[in-house]
Image: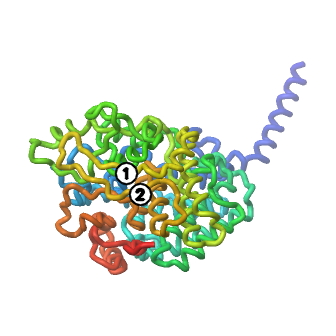
Amino acid sequence: MKNIHKIYVLIMLGLFSLTFQSCKKDFDGIDDDPNQITDKQLETDLQIIGSKFKPVFENIYEYSPVFQLQQNLNADIYGGYLTPPRPFRAGQNNNTYNLVGSWNNHIWVVAYSRVMNNLKKIEELKDYSNNFYAVSLILKVEAMHRVSDIFGPIVYSNFGQSSTSSTYDSQEEAYNQFFADLDEAQNILSQDIDGNKFTKFDMVYGGDYHKWMKFANSLRLRLAIRIAMVDPAKAKLEGEKALANPEGLIESNSESFIVKGNLTHPLKTICCAWNDTRMNASLESFMRGYNDPRLPHYFKESTVSPGEIKGIRGGLPLMSNYTDELAQKADYVGFSTIGDDIVNSTYIQLMTAAEVWFLKAEAALRGWNGAGDAQTNYETGISKSFSQYGVGDAAPAYISDNTSTPMNYVDPVNNSNNINALTNVTIVWDNSASNEEKLEKIITQKWIAMFPEGMEAWSEFRRTGYPKLFPVVSNQSGGTIDTNIQIRRLPFVISEYSTNPDGVAGAVTKLGGPDNGGTRLWWDTGSNF
C-alpha cells in the first residue's frame, strides 16, 4: 500500500509539473497583488477602454455640487430658468454681469480634464473596439458643443497635440468638425449596429447602438438648427441628413438622452441643502400665465407667498435696505425651490424627445425635406413633455388654449423689481401667423419643455431672441453687455490666459470682437427668421 501510495504521489507531482509548465504563461503574475487588475484582465472584457466612459458621462453635466460653477451660476440664470436668492460677492457676480473668472474657470476645467482627457484615451485605445470609439465621438460632440456655445472658439481638433500650447478652432471650424465627427461615428456604428459589448459601460442606452444612432441624428439636427441663421445652406444639408437617416430620431420619452448615474442630482444640493438657487421670474411669468400643469412638478410653492409659485428676477444687486448678503437672502430664500420630481431624480437630462419634436417643427418651418408638418411636430413636442411629467391628459386643452399669455411679474418683497410681461404670445398654433410668430411659439414651448437644461435654454434664447426673458435688474458689466440684448457669451478663462496665452490670443482674433460678455458668437447673428 505504501509503494502504491508513493507511486500515486509521484505521478500526481509529475502531472502537476507538466501542467504547470504548459500553462505557465497563463499564470504569469500569479504572485502579484490579488487586489490589482492586470492589463490582460482589462483587455479581456474591454475594461481597458470601457472604464474611461464613466467620468465622461458624469461630467458633461457634472454629477456633483461643482455643477453650481459649471452651469448653475451662468447658463441656468441667463437661460431664464433659475437664479440665486443670495447676492453673492455683495451683488457683484455673474448674475449682475460682473463676471467672476474664478467661477467660470470650472466650465473649461471640467470639460477638458474630466471629459476630453478621457475621450482622448479612448481614441488612443480605439483598436480594442471601433464601436466604443464611435460612441466616444458622439459624446465628444455633445460635451464640446456646449463649451463652444459658451465661449465661441475652443480647443477641439488640436486637443492633445501639444504639451505646451493649444490652438483654438473658430466656432465655425469647431461646428464643421462636430458634423464630421458625427459622420465618422455613424459610419462606424452602421457596420456593427447590433453589437452588444458596450452594455456594461453605457449609462444612457444600455448598450443599444440603434438608440445611439437616433441620438446622433437628433444631435446633428440640434446643431443644424443652431447654425440655420448664419449658414442656412450647411444647416439644411446637415438637417436633412439627420432627417433622412434610416435609424431615425429620438421620438419617445424612453429614447431621451438621459444619463442614469444613480447618484444625487447636483441641483438637490445647490437648491435644497445650500439654498443657493430658486425659480427665475421669467419662467414664472410664462408657466403661471399659461396655467401650465407641469408647474408643480418643476417647482414647489413659495413660503413668501403661500399658495403661489414665485420666481426671483435675475440680476438682483445687494439692495440698499439690507446690511449684508445673508440678510437679503433670508427674505428671498422663501421663493420657490425646484420640485421633487427633478431634485430627487438620480438622472441627468441632456436631450428629451420633446426637444427633438420642436427641432423638427422648426425644420419644417424652414422647409427642410423630411421634417413633416410644423404644427403636428409642435403639438407632439408639447404632448411628449406633458407625458414626461405624468400630465399627458392635460395636453389637449393646453394645446388648444388661444387666450392665455405670459403674466406680469410681481416681487412680493420689493415692488421696484416688478415688470410687465414682454410678450403676449399664446399657445395655440396659428397657420395664418408669420414664420417669425410661429418661431416664437416653437421656441417658447421648447424652452419650457427643456427645463432644467439651462445650457440649451440660453443658447436658443441667444440664437432666436425667444422666449422674451426679463432683463437683469442691475447690470454691472461696465458697459460691455447691453441690458436689453443681454449676455451673449463668457470670456475665455483665466487658466487659459495663464497657461496658453498664445492660444487665447489666436482665439480672440477668431472671435470677431472683444473678449467680453457682449460679443456675439458665430451663430448668434442677431437676425430674425
Q: For the residue marked with disc 1, what is the amino acid?
A: Pro
Quadrant location of residue 370?
A: bottom right
- The structure residue drawn at horizontal position 56% and vertical position 39%, both measured from the top left corner, is 35
Task: Sort mark 1 into few (<14), some (14-19) or many (20+) by Cα contacts within 10 Å.
Answer: many
From the viewer's perspective, is 298 left or right of 479?
right
Give the answer, above or below, for where 178 lies relative to 67.
below
What is the number of callouts on the image? 2
Give the residue at x 44% y 55%.
426
Tell me the element at label 1.
loop
274 or 124, nearer to the observer: 274
- The picture places residue 373, in percent across and down from the top left corner, at 62, 63
Q: Position of residue 386 (x, y in %)?
A: 54, 44
Percent across and percent down for residue 186 are 66, 66
* Percent coordinates x, y for residue 200 in the rendering: 64, 46
- Tell me which residue sits at (52%, 75%) in the image: 176
Q: Which mark is residue 512?
A: none
Residue holding disc 1: 406
Q: Nearer the viewer, residue 193 or 123?
A: 193
Q: Secondary structure at mark 2?
A: loop
Q: Are marks 1 and 2 in contact (CB under 8 Å)?
A: yes
| Quadrant housing the N terminus | top right
Label 1 to label 2: alpha-carbon separation: 7 Å
Residue 490 or residue 451, whichever sits in front: 451
